[in-house]
Structure formats: structure tokens, C-alpha cells
Image (tube, grey):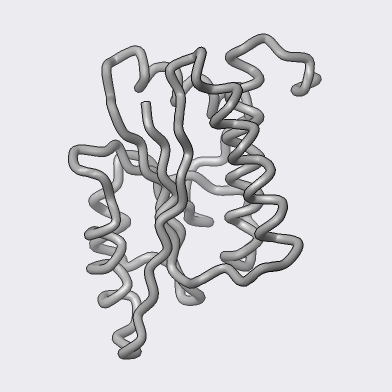
Amino acid sequence: MKLTICAVGRLRKGPEADLIDDYLTRATRSGRALGLGPVSVAEVEDRKGGGMAAEAVLLEKALPDRARVIALDERGVVMSSPDFAEVLARWRDEGVSDCAFVIGGADGIDPAMRARTDQALSFGKMVWPHMLVRVMLAEQIYRAVTILAGSPYHRV
């Protein structure tokens, strides 16, 4: 199952980009044997200032056809890393070919886009900068792969 992070905004070179590249490279490498990956990033940018609605249109275009979609949203479900790994494994086992993660811009995700997703995931009640959410998601994808592989990376 291919994994795509669809995010509003362009990530500049720096520590966040380095962390994301590292985690996604590791996830792609380790996930191959498990039927997970490659993991890629699709960035969109609304240069006309159309707000969340315009961002939603761009995000929709970035989504792979027939992908299961997980929105990163503070109103979403808070789940453990093993539960997150289980969701990915279940979808993979059901024959889902693509899974996309949607990260909105500074104002969040348009309500219509959020309603269209298959799952909403929260990293807690706090609001996180969307660039840090990318890092956290990349790490959790890698962690999910290691959990499914039985690696000691995830300790309970």
C-alpha cells in the first residue's frame, strides 16, 4: 500500500525537512517487505489566498485515486502507535492500494474535505504547527512499520 502525505505549504530545507526525509526513507526501506510504501510527500500551495476552501481543492487534486484518506485534525481520534499500525495493516490486508494523509494549512482543513475523509487522527488536544505535524506523522509512519515488522524500535 502506497502512503502519501498531502500537505499545504512548502517545507524549506532545515531540521524538519531532514527529519522527515530520514523517517520516510527508513519507512520506505523497511516497509517494502511488509507491503507498505513507498512513502511520498505531495505539497500544495494556494498562492491566490483563497483560504481553506481553495486549499481543499488543491489537496483533493493531490490525493491518489481511490485512496483511503486520514485527516490530521485536533478533533480527530487519539490513538496509540500500535492502534495506528493496526489501521494501516488492516487497510493493506483489505487490498487498499493507496493511503493518503491530509495536513491542512495554518487554519486547518476545510470542513468539506474533513467530512470526505475515512478517518481523522489527532496527535492530542493541543494544536501543533503544521510543519511539526509532518515530522510527527513521518515518525509515526516509521514506527508503525517497525511495529508491524516486530522491530524493537517501539518499546511499550
* Residue 31 visible in the snapshot: yes
Position of 156 compared to 30: left or right?
right
Q: Name the foreground residue: 114 vs 64.
A: 64
- x and y percent of residue 156 in the render? 79, 19
Q: Residue furthest left?
A: 66
Q: Residue furthest bottom?
A: 48
* Residue 156 visible in the snapshot: no
- x and y percent of residue 44 in the render? 38, 68
Q: Is residue 101 above or below residue 147?
A: below
- x and y percent of residue 83 in the render? 55, 24
Position of 141 compared to 110: left or right?
right
Q: Name the foreground residue: 138 vs 130.
A: 138
User: How many numbered marks does the figure carry?
Assistant: 0
Task: Tell me which corner region of the image, top left, top right, bottom left or bottom right, holds residue 65.
Answer: top left
Q: Is residue 82 above or below residue 42?
A: above
- Which residue: 46% across, 45% down? 40
- Which residue: 53% across, 29% down? 84
Task: Tell me which corner region of the image, top left, top right, bottom left or bottom right, holds residue 125.
Answer: bottom right
Q: Name the foreground residue: 57 vs 3.
A: 3
- Which residue: 75% across, 22% down? 154
- x and y percent of residue 31 in the render? 54, 22
Position of 37 compared to 17: left or right?
left
Q: Residue furthest top?
A: 150
Q: Quadrant of the N terminus?
A: top left
- Which residue: 29% across, 47% down? 117
